[in-house]
Amino acid sequence: MTEPAAAPDGEPAPARPLPSVDELDLPFFDYDEPGLTGEVYHQRLAAVREQGWLARSPLAVVVLDRESGEFFLRARETAFPGREIADLFGITAGRLRDMIDANILNLTGERHRRLRALVGPAFTPRAAARWRPVMREFLAALWEGLGGATECDVVRAIAKPYPALTIAAVLGAPPGDAPRLHEWSSWVQRQFDIRALASEAGRIEEAVIELHDYAEGLLALRRREPSDDLLSALLAAEADGERLTHEECVNLVLNVLAGGVDTTQAQLSHALRLFAAHPRQWELLRQQPDLVPQAVAEVLRHEPITPFTARICTGRIEHRGVVFPPGTIVAVCAERANRDQQAGEEFDITAERDARVLTFGAGAHFCLGANLARAELAEALTFLAPRLPGLRPAGEPVLGGVEGIYGIDSLPLAWSAG
Ligand code: HEM
């Protein structure tokens, strides 16, 4: 900031008030625009980013670089706007609203810190690593199911069933329940999707009720017969002499299910799409399996399946000479933040990169399942790379929209007989 110029009588001129973000003339970016997907979406964002670090969109201002993205995710005067968005769509009471209110993402301050302290130990890298053998078993069974085919829709065959099976195992649910857990989770996850809240709130609420009852049943079973799964760990979790209440346990199960299925499915689908489009990178990974952790990191950086996450300003915030009044909704763009470095548009699993990407968020709400997701992706790439030589596209993929979780509906790929 520059010093205020001196007035003619020697007194310093009164400082000019900082502009409010509402007054700024900003480029427009509509993340809800039909057809905004694939390369078009990256190009559109790159063009908006060239004009500055801020843009305007229908419901929010969009923050386009990493420094400011991290700032808003970590700022004490911001919160996830889940309740405000629910209000906007008239979801002010009922089971769906109760679940939104109790969602860990919508909790702040001491309540949130307490929950994270209690559940943190169940989500460490070591805790995630325990599930790796089970992940390998699921991958082997899904591979068997392909019966030697050299072409398939890899979303339907692998990326979709795999995370639901894993989460079922982590929670201690029978593998046979994975398909209905998948169905519930993708409905419950739509509490974050503005289009679905507008048109399908009834179906989301039904899924919330069904899943809530299911989680209650599973918890009752684990209370009677503790095992070595996540539910038993939650029931036993204790920090500073405190335990989780029954409702907290049920809600955490809902949060883990809602947050842990569509996300990993989408990220693995994009990983396979990226490698099919970059055959030399895939060949390199096949020859050097020790590149898997870097490959996972590069997929997460290059194609984050959570391209935008949101914050609402709960107080007046000043940042980079701009005032963000209370109530301002800020969309943090992980896609641009992750490419905010030299050669950022390239997909390259050998490049030395700064590890601070925003795909899993930042600050207090940093993804609880990040270690589990990384382990799932690493196991999948380790398993698939040697089995899919010559991986290539075998048709047009059907890509989802980028406004919520950026998924892939179908991805036909082919490979050579191994
Ligand atoms: C590639 C996969 C995944 C991605 C990209 C992802 C992304 C994210 C992001 C961006 C956030 C923070 C949102 C915000 O601050 O606004 C988040 C939070 C969260 N994620 Fe994930 N996630 C993934 C997988 C998982 C898995 C496997 C689980 C469950 C085991 C999970 C459970 C959660 C939970 C419970 C939160 C809320 C944490 C809190 O509020 O303290 N996620 N995730």
Image: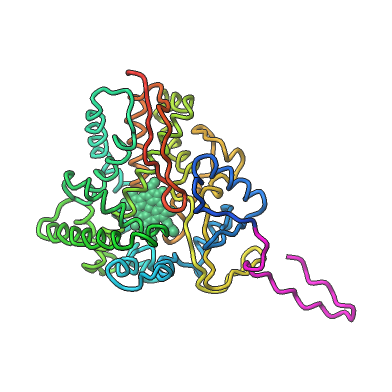
**Closest to the observer, 292 or 404:** 404
Residues rendered magenta in the picture = 1-26
By secondary structure, the bulk of the magenta-drawn segment is best described as loop
Residue 213 location in percent, x, y? Answer: 18, 61
**Closest to the observer, 331 or 3:** 331
Q: Quadrant of the N terminus?
A: bottom right
**Horizontal placement of 415 versus 253: left or right?**
right
The answer to whether residue 4 is above or below residue 289 is below
Seen at 28% across and 40% down, the residue is 162
Residue 41 location in percent, x, y? Answer: 53, 45
Q: Residue furthest left?
A: 224
Q: Quadrant of ligand 1?
A: bottom left
Residue 227 location in percent, x, y? Answer: 15, 52
Is residue 326 inside the magenta stretch? no
**Closest to the observer, 366 or 199:** 199
**Closest to the observer, 233 or 340:** 340
Is residue 16 inside the magenta stretch? yes
Residue 87 location in percent, x, y? Answer: 41, 71
**Horizontal placement of 149 versus 326: left or right?**
left
**Horizontal placement of 115 versus 35: left or right?**
left
The answer to whether residue 396 is above or below residue 205 is above
Asked where in the image residue 159 lies, by quadrant, the reply is: top left
Residue 337 visible here: yes
Residue 124 visible here: no
Seen at 33% across and 25% down, the residue is 151
The answer to whether residue 170 is above or below residue 190 is above
